[in-house]
Amino acid sequence: MKTIAVIPARLASTRLPRKMLRDVMGKPLIGVVYEAVRLSPLLSEVIIATDSDEIMSACRQHGWNARLTSSQHRSGTERVHEISNTESADVYINVQGDEPLVRAEQIGRLLQVMENPAVQVGTLITPAADPDIANPNAVKVVTDLKGRALYFSRATIPFDRDNSNPRYFKHLGLYAYRKPALDKFVSLSESFLENSERLEQLRFLENGIPIYVGETPYDSVGVDTEEDLRRVMEILKTR
């Protein structure tokens, strides 16, 4: 499959202002993500998609492949869709710009999910570490027996009513789409659940579009807070 990875990156983040340009081991955060994604040999191209002139300037300075996209997009998926209108591929991978610990193995696992031509949308899960189970910044996932997501939530799901010690799974910020799924996504209005949880993937589920998940043992840390940023830098120092 010809696969293009797109890294949506906007400067106007609320919880951690200007996080895409925050310094991580001597580079802007977006560049750490870009260089990590580039390590996958399965990708035809990696593109940073941004609406920020500052991010574009940083990309030009470092030689990172970037495109200026519309400032009207309300989600990363919409930004990926804009790229899909000019760049042809069998599969488009959306890597969140705040996932500096992304690994080539994760991308490989995600593409295994997409080997089934019937799958229109795929993503990844990993066993949730104890600190993430009750953390609203770590999105939890429950799935059916066929590996399709039933729901994503910032809440702790499933609820352990009888102390049965269920397995909890954390959602990782990587998605894979086929072009028709992207076209459908942008044609739909923002959904109630999407707005409630502030999770764009719920637009697919609320409109009956299944999301297939693959499990990976490799966890990640999305950078949403100063604490996340410190945690990421400590992990990168040990690599």
Image: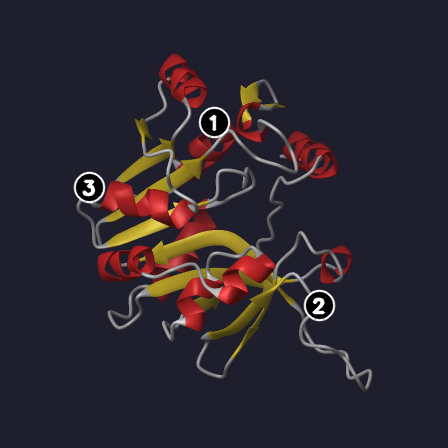
Percent position of residue 159, x then y: 73, 77
User: Along the polypeptide, which appears first: circle 2 or circle 3?
Assistant: 3
For badge 1, the amino acid type reads: Gly
Distance in Å between CA atoms under marks 3 and 1 = 21 Å
Q: Quadrant of residue 13?
A: top right
In this figure, which residue is indicated by the disc labeled 2? 156
Image quarter where the N terminus lies is bottom left
Which residue is disc 3 drawn over?
Answer: 87
At 60% across and 53% down in the image, what residue appears? 219
Q: Position of residue 209 (x, y in %)?
A: 36, 72
Q: Which mark is residue 234?
A: none
When the figure is inspected, residue 227 is found, relative to residue 31, above or below; the finding is: below
Q: Residue at x 79, y 83 (%)?
A: 161
SS state under label 3: loop
Total marks placed = 3
How packed is label 3: few (under 14 Cα within 10 Å), some, or many (20 or more)? few
State the residue position of label 1. Answer: 31
Image point (65%, 61%), residue name: 154
Q: Earlier in the sequence, mark 1 or mark 2?
A: 1
